[in-house]
């Protein structure tokens, strides 16, 4: 059961919304709705339109993971929508790692020098994952001016690519 990582667009919006909202609301009790995330209703324009991307991880044709990249400046971008279904987390499948590796490779190939992300402190396993992948803590005040801040985010990480 090797996962397939591919770029996805609007035809997968419904599956992505179901996956992401289930994890946010039911698993981690994050008070966020689809109204707070209109990007998921138009993946193509929101992510690809500015030079970013959106990838899905599939196992047996089921969407089990997502990751997205928003390019917010000429050489800077932000990770968004990094979610993996609980049953597919961990080293057995390495879906999160494969998604992140795909995003970083895309960023490097497209002249992005730095990647940022925002998250919440209760996502401890995610924070450890980013630290293992050389993301370093950064205070909110030090984020680039154009960084696309999400309402619940209060923990930030940075990965220089150069």
Image (cartoon, rainbow, N blue to C red):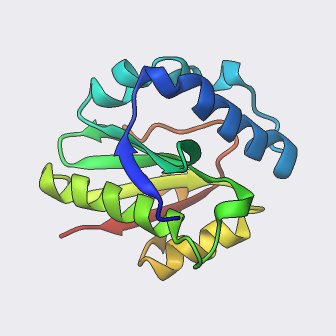
Residue 73 figure quarter: top left
Q: Quadrant of residue 31?
A: top right
In this orientation, does residue 138 appear? no
The image shows residue 6, relative to residue 133, as above or below, that is above
Q: In this view of the protein, which residue sits in the foreground, 151 or 56?
A: 56
Tally of numbered tags:
0
116 horizontally vs 113: left or right: right
Which image quarter holds the C terminus?
bottom left
Residue at 14% across, 49% down: 110
Residue 56: x and y in percent read: 46, 44
Tell me: 50 left or right of 60.
left
Residue 102 image position (x, y, % from top left): 32, 58
In this image, 112 relative to 156: left or right? Answer: left
The relative height of residue 135 versus residue 85 in the rendered view (above or below) is below
Q: Residue at x 59, y 34 (%)?
A: 16
Give the x, y percent position of residue 113. 20, 59
For the point 52% across and 71% down, the residue is: 94
What residue do we see at 73% from left, 59% from top? 86
In the image, 135 versus 49, the foreground residue is: 49
Q: Where's residue 135, x and y in %?
A: 44, 72
Q: Looking at the image, can residue 84 be seen?
A: yes
Between residue 94 and residue 36, name the one nearer to us.
94
């Amino acid at each position: 059961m090797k996962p397939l990582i591919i770029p996805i667009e609007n035809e997968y919006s419904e599956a992505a919304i179901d996956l992401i909202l289930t994890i946010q609301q039911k698993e981690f009790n994050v008070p966020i709705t689809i109204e707070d995330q209109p990007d998921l209703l138009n993946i193509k324009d929101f992510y690809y339109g500015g030079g970013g991307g959106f990838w899905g991880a599939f196992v047996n044709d089921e969407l089990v993971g997502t990751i997205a990249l928003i390019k917010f400046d000429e050489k800077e971008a932000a990770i968004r929508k990094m979610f993996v279904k609980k049953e597919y987390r961990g080293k057995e499948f390495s879906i999160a790692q494969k998604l992140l590796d795909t995003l970083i490779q895309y960023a490097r190939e497209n002249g992005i020098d730095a990647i940022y992300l925002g998250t919440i402190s209760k996502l401890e396993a995610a924070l450890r994952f980013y630290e293992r992948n050389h993301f370093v803590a950064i205070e909110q005040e030090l984020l680039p001016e154009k960084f696309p801040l999400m309402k619940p985010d209060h923990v930030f990480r940075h990965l220089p690519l150069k």
